[in-house]
């Protein structure tokens, strides 16, 4: 008997660049495309994924535009404060008040399905696949987005400190397969085949900051190797796994941290177009 197909949707992070992914997901919503059994989101990708699962069209795009130029969220004036340059507490509060997630819809639409938010355990550097509930949903989103230096750096859930999931499993397609997926649609904010050319400045700084914790330190010092290995995995042929990637044709105008509304708008529409193109070929 042929094994039943199990489809996963994986959303890579990317800060403000995730507005591209939101455009793709809004194209899915327009076409009522929701064949997924497994959902996995990383960092900002987890937030736009959440709005998609909640069937909230264009809300992530609206939120991105509203906070992109808001100095209460992004400001060098509080860069050295406890909250850091990006105030995730403010973002959570703002989202709850102005662009709230329909948490009940998320719970109902993921019944008998799997929904994970990737975070990094700050004690051992390992990826943790959080399964949020109505009480801790925003907390899990905050945990997966906690960048060292740029934000508070960590988020505590049930006594465990977490940081951005991108440091431990930035493109969790292998994890999707381990959770039972036979097909994975992965949305990425970088062109197809993009690889890191070396360590980022943030990875270098963070590696030295956590130099006394080898497990966490290596997540930073080996960030390019880990990321590039994940990209290679996407391109390989697998016996029991099909991987479909949706990526922009060229580098986006938006940046990970801080960007303009015009750039966000252009990148969102690029994602919307890519999503429509993908669906037109998917159903052929």
Image: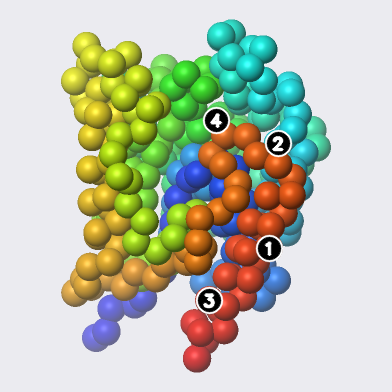
Label 1 SS: helix
Name the residue that disc number 2 marks: 68
State the CA–CA distance, disc 4 to disc 1. Answer: 26 Å
Tag 4 near tag 1, CB within 8 Å: no
Q: Nearer the viewer, residue 6 or 222?
A: 222
Name the residue that disc number 1 marks: 269
Residue that appears at 44% across and 60% down: 191
Q: Nearer the viewer, mark 1 or mark 3?
A: 1
* Left or right, residue 66 beside residue 221: right
Q: Return the disc, 2 or 3, that comes first in the chain's sequence.
A: 2
Q: Return the disc, 4 or 1, that comes first in the chain's sequence.
A: 4
Name the residue that disc number 3 marks: 278
Q: Nearer the viewer, mark 2 or mark 3?
A: 2
Residue 16 visible to an observer of this rendering: yes
Disc 2 crowd rating (10 Å Cα; few below 14, some 14-19, many 20+) is some
Name the residue that disc number 4 marks: 142
State the CA–CA distance, disc 4 to disc 3. Answer: 30 Å
State the CA–CA distance, disc 4 to disc 2. Answer: 17 Å
């Amino acid at each position: 008997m042929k094994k039943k197909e199990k489809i996963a949707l994986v959303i890579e992070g990317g800060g403000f660049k995730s507005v591209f992914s939101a455009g793709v997901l809004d194209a899915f919503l327009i076409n009522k495309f929701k064949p997924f059994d497994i959902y996995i989101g990383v960092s900002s990708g987890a937030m736009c994924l959440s709005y998609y699962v909640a069937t909230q069209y264009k809300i992530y795009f609206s939120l991105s535009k509203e906070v992109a130029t808001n100095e209460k969220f992004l400001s060098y004036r509080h860069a050295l404060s406890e909250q850091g340059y990006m105030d995730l507490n403010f973002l959570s509060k703002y989202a709850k008040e102005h662009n709230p997630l329909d948490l009940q819809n998320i719970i109902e639409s993921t019944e008998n399905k799997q929904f994970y938010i990737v975070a990094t355990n700050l004690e051992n550097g390992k990826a943790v696949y959080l399964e949020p509930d109505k009480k801790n949903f925003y907390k899990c989103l905050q945990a997966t987005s906690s960048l060292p230096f740029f934000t508070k750096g960590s988020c505590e859930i049930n006594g465990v400190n977490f940081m951005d999931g991108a440091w431990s499993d930035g493109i969790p397609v292998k994890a999707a397969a381990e959770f039972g997926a036979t097909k994975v649609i992965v949305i990425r904010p970088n062109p197809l085949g993009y690889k890191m050319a070396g360590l980022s400045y943030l990875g270098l700084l963070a590696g030295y900051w956590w130099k006394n914790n080898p497990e966490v330190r290596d997540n930073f010092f080996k960030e390019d190797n880990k990321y590039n290995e994940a990209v290679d995995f996407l391109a390989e042929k697998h016996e029991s796994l099909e991987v479909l990637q949706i990526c922009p044709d060229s580098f986006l105008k938006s940046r990970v941290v801080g960007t303009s509304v015009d750039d966000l708008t252009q990148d969102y529409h690029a994602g919307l177009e890519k999503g429509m193109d993908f669906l037109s070929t998917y159903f052929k």
